[in-house]
Amino acid sequence: MKDEYASSKGTRGKFYRKCAVMDLPVYLDPEVRGYLAERAKLKGSELNELVNELLKREIALIEAVKTPAATSSLSHDRMGSLAEDRSAARLADRPIDSRRTGTVVAIKQ
């Protein structure tokens, strides 16, 4: 390796693209990855599809409890689906964060 490199003929920003989107890797713990990979295989889908689906459901739950008015806009079917997802997580013998599961959402009829 040289002690010095000449950069006088270099072009600043030659490969910079303002609208470029960079996908960052997401690293899962080995036990989480193994569990989700098994669930994805049983479901017949790819691991990334399952992880995206789970994250979208979690976002929907967070948004649903963020404001009281948001619960009235959720359909009964959607609320039932969210409750089923939570029940499935409990049956998975995995610890669940009580801060998330302790939230009560009222359904207005």
Image: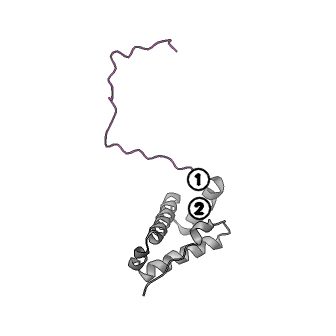
Magenta highlight range? 1-28
When the figure is inspected, residue 86 is found, relative to residue 40, above or below; the finding is below
Q: Is residue 20 above or below residue 32?
A: above
Q: What percent of the width, then of the height, locates residue 15?
A: 34, 32
Q: Residue placed farthest to the bottom in the image?
A: 109
Q: Earlier in the sequence, mark 1 or mark 2?
A: 1
Front residue of this view, candidates 46 and 86: 86
- The amino acid beneath tag 1 is Leu
Residue 23: image location, x then y, percent? 44, 47
Q: Position of residue 25 (x, y in %)?
A: 50, 47
| Mark linked to residue 36 | 2
Identify the residue at image location x=43%, y=71%. 67
In the picture shown, does residue 35 fall above or below 72?
A: above
Residue 63 position, x and y percent, is: 44, 67
| Nearest to the observer: residue 65 or residue 57 | 65
**Which quadrant holds residue 33?**
bottom right
Residue at 45% from the left image edge and 68% from the top image edge: 66
Camera-near label (1 vs 2) is 1
For label 1, the SS is loop
Please, what is the three-letter code of the amino acid marked with disc 2? Answer: Leu
Q: Is residue 12 magenta?
A: yes
- The residue sitting at 45% across, 71% down in the picture is 64
Q: Quickly name the residue at label 1.
A: 28
**CB of mark 1 within 8 Å of CB of mark 2?**
yes
| Residue 17 relative to residue 23: left or right | left
User: Which image quadrant: the C terminus?
Assistant: bottom left
